[in-house]
Amino acid sequence: MEPSLSPTRSLRGHADFVPKAVFSKNGNNLKIISTSLDKTVRIWDMDTGEQESSFEGHDSRIYGLAVSMDGRRIVSGAEDGKIIIWDADTKEIIRCLSHHTDWVICIQFSPDEKRLASASTDGTLKIWDADTGELVFDIDDHQDRVWTVAFSPNGTKIASGSFDHTVRIWSAATGKQQIQPLIHDSEVYSIVWSPDSRRLISGCGDGQIYFWSAPTGAQLGFPLRAHSEIIMLLAISPDGELIASASTDHTAKLWSTSTRKPFGRILQHAGEVNTVAFSPDGQLVATGSDENMAIFLWDISQESTIMAHAVSPSFISPASNITSYIDQKVPILFQPPLHQHRTNY
């Protein structure tokens, strides 16, 4: 059995499992904000591990979550297609957005926080004015559920991933598709961008992680066979040197973006892992699981000491560095079976 890291703390209080949890920094105060199928959004104090606030206003189970950089606006998306923008200080509802007709799975602010993007199982990607709630773009080019959406860090592009086995890249200014769809072997559950906006990383239902050139759509080497079941979510560290993957195989794992090899120890859970996030300084990882409906905190600072030789910034360097790595042949860790999407989520 592979060695596993132990969590430093668990946050308990939700009455159902946690699809999303993110770190939020308001001044010097680091918080965790989470959504749950118990129809609540909650804020947790990082110092005490105690629940600080609970937001109740949704009539159905909550999946999507986005938080502004200053922590003052929280956006949640629910199973009935409703999106709520909250004032984090007063817990009041600022605005409700209700154009989706099915589950809102993923929400993200643009880097300048002027727009919101939402992905839904109704097959659409929608772009909103974050201040007025006006619908700016309504994109329905995908042929199946849209499960993930992400603005590029430079704010010029939007990537969406779907159960139609594609990632598509759109102009944030016009809503037009930029290049041909990026084809996968399975459903696309999660996307992250490299900090320089030149690379995309996607996680899929067959447990594989793909690496792409965003300008050209070229696949960068072979997919990484990371998990034996669905990859529910990917996260990238603030410096772009690590990615974290959360899976229904009861694990979250860390990977070097330069070598694509495992980094540190496995984050083992007793249940499916639905979400994963890095803290702003990259020293902590948060995971959400259906294990006791808890959020777990993991200190990975010592992992970086143990495995420092595995990390370099070449992933976000020019493509020649990536080519030299591809020529060395990406190691195959294991061959996962193809799993179908579970029906209760």
Image (tube, grey):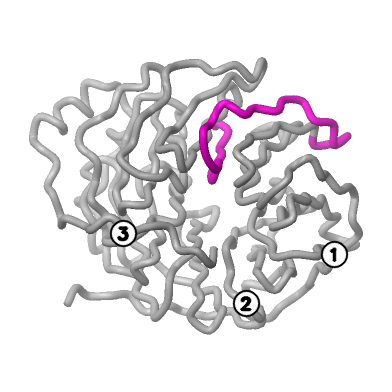
Residue 342 drawn above or below residue 268: above
Say which mark, if any, is on residue 57.
1
Q: Which residue is pictured at 53% across the width and 35% down the height?
A: 160
Characterize the local packing of mark 1: few (<14), some (14-19) or many (20 or more) Cα atoms within 10 angstroms. Answer: some
Residue 330 drawn above or below residue 325: below
| SS category of the residue bearing label 3 | helix
Q: Which residue is pictured at 36% across the width and 22% down the height?
A: 217
Give whichever of discs 3 and 2 has the lower sequence position.
2
Say which mark, if any, is on residue 16.
2
The N terminus lies in which quarter of the figure? bottom left
Q: Is residue 9 magenta?
A: no
Q: Which residue is pictured at 58% across the width and 33% down the height?
A: 151
- Pinpoint residue 91: horizontal percent, then vertical percent: 87, 63
Instruction: Answer with left or right where residue 338 lies relative to residue 215.
Output: left
| SS category of the residue bearing label 2 | loop
- Pinpoint residue 51: horizontal percent, then vertical percent: 71, 78
**Would you say the residues marked 1 and 3 are in contact, meaning their CB atoms lie under 8 Å apart?**
no
Q: Which of 18 and 181 is in front in this view?
A: 181
Mark closer to the observer (1, 3)? 1
Amino acid of disc 1: Gly
Mark closer to the observer (3, 2)? 2
Characterize the local packing of mark 3: few (<14), some (14-19) or many (20 or more) Cα atoms within 10 angstroms. Answer: some
- In space, the residues marked 1 and 2 are separated at their CA atoms by 16 Å
Q: Which residue is pictured at 42% across the width and 77% down the height?
A: 271
Q: Is residue 149 magenta?
A: yes
The segment highlighted magenta reads 130-154
Residue 269 drawn above or below residue 334: below
Q: Nearer the viewer, residue 278 or 335?
A: 335
- Residue position marked by numbered label 3 in the rendering: 304
Instruction: Answer with left or right where residue 233 lies relative to residue 29.
Output: left
- In space, the residues marked 3 and 2 are separated at their CA atoms by 33 Å
The C terminus lies in which quarter of the figure? bottom right
